[in-house]
Image (cartoon, helix red, strand yellow):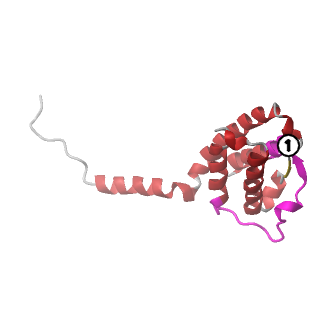
Amino acid sequence: MLSGHRASLPTNYPLSFLCLYCLFAMAPWLGLKTVNCTREGIEEVDKIRSYITGLKDAADCKLYTPRVHDYENCPITTLSCFVKEFKVLVFDLELHKTNLTKPLDRRLNILNQKQWQKDREGCPQCEVYEEKTAEAFLKDLQSILQYIHYNG
């Protein structure tokens, strides 16, 4: 039987709620969303790679393509280059007519805005990187997203 006492919240409930709120508020700065963002981004690149395989114009599309070692030295400029070149890819292959690229575009912009690392001196402009096919560009983008996913 019930003793007639009402259940009450612990006296530290407001403090617990505040701590939980702060944890969620700090999540982007702590990098907690980066892992999900990159894992899902990797899957989205797979979908786009599969889609463009059947496009005849994909072989003609050339994009400046940084590599993982470029990201290790110059993460900000490398991601910025991928964001710019991804927009070129979407335009050149008319991918904006599909719903395929919007989630990845959003994720790349989120990653590009995070300033958790700094570039070393002497980072090259995007136009310095080798021009590669759309397929190779997406493969290297996927490699960088995997690197971010596993190495932070």
Please, what is the three-letter code of the amino acid marked with disc 1?
Ala
Q: Residue at x 60, y 44 (%)?
A: 36
Residue extending furthest toward the bottom: 121
Along the line of sight, the residue nearer the viewer: 145 or 13: 145
Q: Residue at x 84, y 65 (%)?
A: 124
Q: Residue at x 68, y 46 (%)?
A: 149
Secondary structure under tag 1 reads helix
Residue extending furthest toward the left: 4
Which residues fall within the magenta stretch? 113-140
Q: Is residue 102 left or right of residue 19?
A: right
Where residue 3 sits: x, y (%)?
A: 10, 35
Along the line of sight, the residue nearer the viewer: 31 or 1: 31
Where residue 45 sits: x, y (%)?
A: 72, 40
Q: Which residue is mark 1?
A: 136
Using the image, determine if residue 90 lies above or below residue 122: above
Question: Does the segment drawn in magenta span residue 119?
Answer: yes
Residue extending furthest toward the top: 1
Where residue 107 sits: x, y (%)?
A: 63, 49
The quarter holding residue 60 reads top right
Where residue 10 sits: x, y (%)?
A: 25, 49
Using the image, determine if residue 52 lies above or below residue 13: above
Q: Is residue 81 left or right of residue 40?
A: right
Q: Which corner quadrant holds the N terminus?
A: top left
Q: Residue at x 72, y 62 (%)?
A: 76
